Amino acid sequence: MEEENIEKIAEEIAKICFDGNYTLFRFTTNWQFGFGTINPKSLYCGIGGLTPKKINGYGKLYAGKTKEKAMYGAIMDFLKVEMKK
C-alpha cells in the first residue's frame, strides 16, 4: 500500500466503525496509532509524563517508525478481527 492510501483507509475505517475517531501520537522514537479515542483513566504518569496504554472502542495502540506503519498495523489487526466475525 502507498502511504497516502494507508491514511485514507485508516480514516475510512474510523468514520465507518468508530464514529470518525482515531488517536495518533508522535514520540521521539516512533508513532502510535489506534482506532477510537483515549480513555483518560488508562493513562499513567511515568518517566517522561503521560503514556498511552489503552484506548476506548478498540483498545490497542500500534507502534511504527512512521505514522503510516503504525496505521498499517492497526488496519491489518482490525481486518483480522472483522474477518473472524
Image (spheres, rainbow, N blue to C red):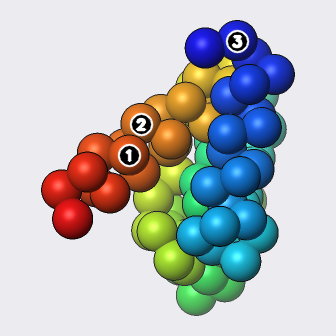
Q: Of residues 71 and 19, which is closer to you in this image?
A: 19
**Quarter of the image where the N terminus is located:** top right
Out of 37 and 77, give the one closest to the viewer.
77
84 lies left or right of 12: left
Which residue shows up at 38% across the image and 46% down it?
A: 79
Measured as percent of width and height from the top left, residue 70 is found at 59, 32
Circles 1 and 2 in contact, beta carbons < 8 Å? yes
Who's the residue at 41% across and 51% down the image?
78
Please tell me whether residue 37 is drawn above or below residue 72 in the rendered image: below
- Viewer-closest of 45 and 16: 16
Q: Above or below — where is 30 with respect to 25?
A: above
Classify 35 as above or below 7: below
At mark 2, the secondary structure is: helix
Pointer 3 local density, CA inside 10 Å: few below 14, some 14–19, many at least 20: few
Measured in 3D between alpha carbons, the distance from the residue under mark 2 to the one under mark 3, in whole angstroms, is 14 Å
Residue matched to label 2: 76
The local secondary structure at tag 3 comes to loop
Q: Name the residue under label 3.
A: 2
Where is residue 13? Give x, y as percent. Answer: 62, 55
Residue 37, given in percent of the width and then of the height, sits at 68, 73
> Which amino acid lies under the numbered mark 3 shown in the image of this protein?
Glu
Residue type at tag 1: Leu
Q: What amino acid does circle 2 point to?
A: Met
Where does label 1 land, which residue? 79
Does 56 sit above or below residue 15? below
